[in-house]
Structure formats: structure tokens, C-alpha cells
Amino acid sequence: PLSRWKYAQGPDRLIAISRRVRDVLLENGVPPERIALIPSGIALDTPPPPEGPSLRKRLGAPTGAPIVLTIATLADYKDHPTLIQAARRLRAREPMTRWAVCGAGGLLEEIRSEVQRRGLADRLGYLGYVAGARGLLPEADVFCLSSKTEGLGTSVLDAMAAGVPVAATAGGGIPEMIEHEVTGLLAPVGDGAALAAAVD
């Protein structure tokens, strides 16, 4: 295949940011001796909150309402439809819960349409790109990521470093960070019901 030729003719060494990325490279014909496994890391400083209103005020969430935060580009592999399914399912059990989605990307209108179609416009708020969004994490009760796949998923590391419980799908390198029922909760990829249960 062309991908195998590309890797065969490529650089002397490739860095894999997770074991899953290393496995994909091996599957595409990269010799193991040309792969260096160097997992991504994050800064452990506590960032200040972004300028502007608090997360609760941005959402118009009442005092005491739990907040579920997602920070993810609006791309197909982040699988926002599964996130929306989880929000719809959880609404029946926890009607006070509010969901905040931070990120930019080409699927904005598609996601907004799905939120409207599911009747979640008053429960799921799209905040767009927020500079320094990592600073919103301490205001969240749960961090949720619904990705189909990830190289590693450093937003999960950011949430863990901020002490925010994580509910995520087991896509790509995410299970390398989250041990189910020990350091967070994992749901199968694409399973909105299981993700809702993890958030709950």
C-alpha cells in the first residue's frame, strides 16, 4: 500500500505519543527499531480562568446544577453525536445537569442542528473557541470526552491534573491514561448510553 511505501521512504525515526499510535505505525509497516515511544505530557501549573464570565454564567446554569465540560475540536473523530446522545439520556435522570462544549471546527452547524433536534438547546451550551479553556476545568464537576480515537488525548490529562473526574470513551490512547473504575470511567466508543452512565 502507498502508506507502507511512504513510511518505508520516510524519516529515520518516528515518535509515537502512545502505545496505540506505535501499534498503528507497526501495522503500516514501520520497523519497530524506527519507532520511539514518547508519551505526550502536560504542564502541571494551575492556569488562571479565561477572561470573561465564569463557566456557570456562560452556560446560564443555576446555582447547584452539575456541569459537564468537554474541550475538543469539532471534528468527526471527536464524535460529538455520542456526547449529545449521552446528554439526552442523562437529562431524564439528572435534569439539572448542564453540558459545556468548548472548541472550534468545521462541524459547528451540524452539531448545533443535532442539539436542536434533540431538544437540548437549554441543556448543552456551545462556547466556541475559548483561549485558555484549560482554566475552566476547576469549575466543572465532570470532564467528558467522546472520541472515536485519539493519539493520546491530553485534554484528559489536563482534567486529571485539575482534579476533575473523567468519563470518556475507550478510543485510541485514552485507556492508557484512564484505568476504568480506578482513575476514571470508560465507555465503549459510540455508546451514548454507557457514556451517560459513566458521567452519572
Image: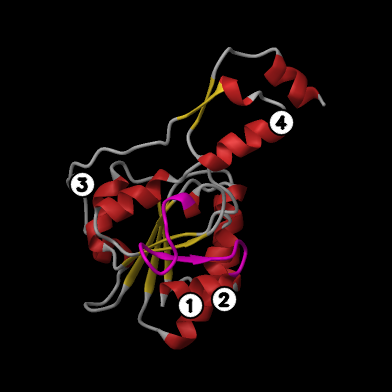
Q: Secondary structure at mark 4?
A: loop
* Distance between mark 1 and mark 3 Cα atoms: 33 Å
Q: Determine the image quadrant of residue 27.
A: top right
Q: CA distance from mark 2 to mark 4?
A: 34 Å
Indicate the position of residue 134 as horizontal and vertical percent values.
29, 47
Q: For residue 193, which numbered disc appears in the image? A: 2
Q: Assess whether residue 190 is covered by the magenta stretch.
A: yes
- How dense is the environment of label 2, judged by Cα within 10 Å: few (below 14), some, or many (20 and up)? some
Outermost residue, bottom direction? 93
Q: CA gap, disc 1 to disc 4? A: 36 Å
Q: Which residue is mark 1?
A: 197
Q: Earlier in the sequence, mark 1 or mark 4?
A: 4
Specify whether 49 is left or right of 143: left
Identify the residue under disc 4. 28
Q: Is residue 96 visible?
A: yes
Left or right of 147 in this view: 176 = left
Which of pointers 2 and 3 lies earlier in the amino acid sequence?
3
Q: Nearer the viewer, mark 3 or mark 4?
A: 4
Disc 4 residue type?
A: Asn
**Disc 3 marks which residue?**
51
Q: Could you tell me the amino acid type at mark 2?
A: Ala
Q: Secondary structure at mark 3?
A: loop
